[in-house]
Amino acid sequence: MVVKLYGHPLATSGHRVQIVLEELNVPYELITLSFEKQDHKSPEYLAHQPFGQMPYMDDDGFELFETRAICRYLAVKYGGIGTLLPPQSDVEATARFEQAASVELNNFEAPVSQLAWEVWYKPMRGLKTIPEEAQAYKTKLEGRMDAYDAMLSKTKFLAGDDLTMADLFHLPYESFLKEQGFDFVSGESTRWPNVARWWKEIASRPSWKKVIASS
């Protein structure tokens, strides 16, 4: 059976799941929903995803939402243990992964999504961007990247010297970060050299290139 992902080809949240599907070589179908028609707020969609958010997944009748939960499920079911997730028998590696996953969610996703809302999504919805708030969010994210650079001065990836999905979860914001002047996405940075080295490596993954090509 083909995994069905209900979302939108431009949605960063869906890209997170698509990267993992591509890494695992799992066949999938992206069923495109319309933002304009508010498909994700329809009664039919809410029966599957009660929060009206994209995406949700249907794997042969097993439905799941929340992208990080979907990604972990896929890794466990489709051979991602030891590649995208550490084996649970390795307690220390699992703890380092959980730490990295928390860092991504709280210290990257939170500030970058706030910045994206202010400078990207507000104008799309006819709302006015507040420059002072945008700058505050950008400054906050810059500070978080300082901490990232310190972490990545000690290890190759966020959870150690092995790639995990916690690293890949950052990629959907690549074009946005570039637009906002975060030079590390180019692979070089004076302020964040370790982040730049790390980003260059994860962004070169064939899985990410396939997702970009399809969006």
Image (cartoon, helix red, strand yellow):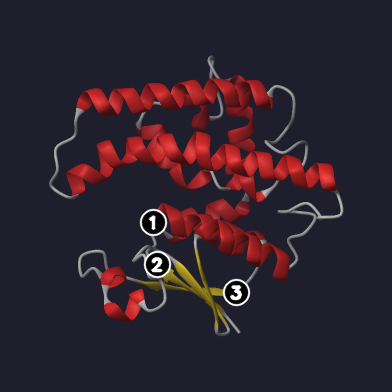
Q: Say whether residue 207 is left or right of residue 114.
A: right
Q: Amino acid at mark 3?
A: Pro
Q: Amino acid at mark 2?
A: Gly
Spatial distance from mark 2 to mark 1, Cα to Cα?
A: 7 Å
Regarding residue 32, the answer to whether it shows in the image is: yes
Which sits earlier in the primary sequence, circle 3 or circle 1? 1
Where's residue 133, x and y in %?
26, 27
Where's residue 5, x and y in %?
48, 71
* Residue position marked by numbered label 1 in the rendering: 11
The total of numbered circles placed on residues is: 3
Q: Dot 3 lies on which element?
A: loop
Give the image quarter of residue 193.
top right
Query: Which mark is on residue 25?
Result: none
Which sits earlier in the primary sequence, circle 2 or circle 3? 2
Q: Dot 1 lies on which element?
A: loop
Where's residue 60, x and y in %?
58, 84
Quarter of the picture holding the C terminus: bottom left
Residue displayed at 75% across by 66% down: 79
Front residue (pair 132, 176):
132
Give the image quarter of residue 155.
top right
* Residue position marked by numbered label 3 in the rendering: 27
Q: Dot 2 lies on which element?
A: strand
Give the image quarter of residue 93.
top right
The answer to whether the residues at label 2 and label 1 have Cβ atoms under 8 Å apart is yes
Query: Which mark is on residue 7?
Result: 2
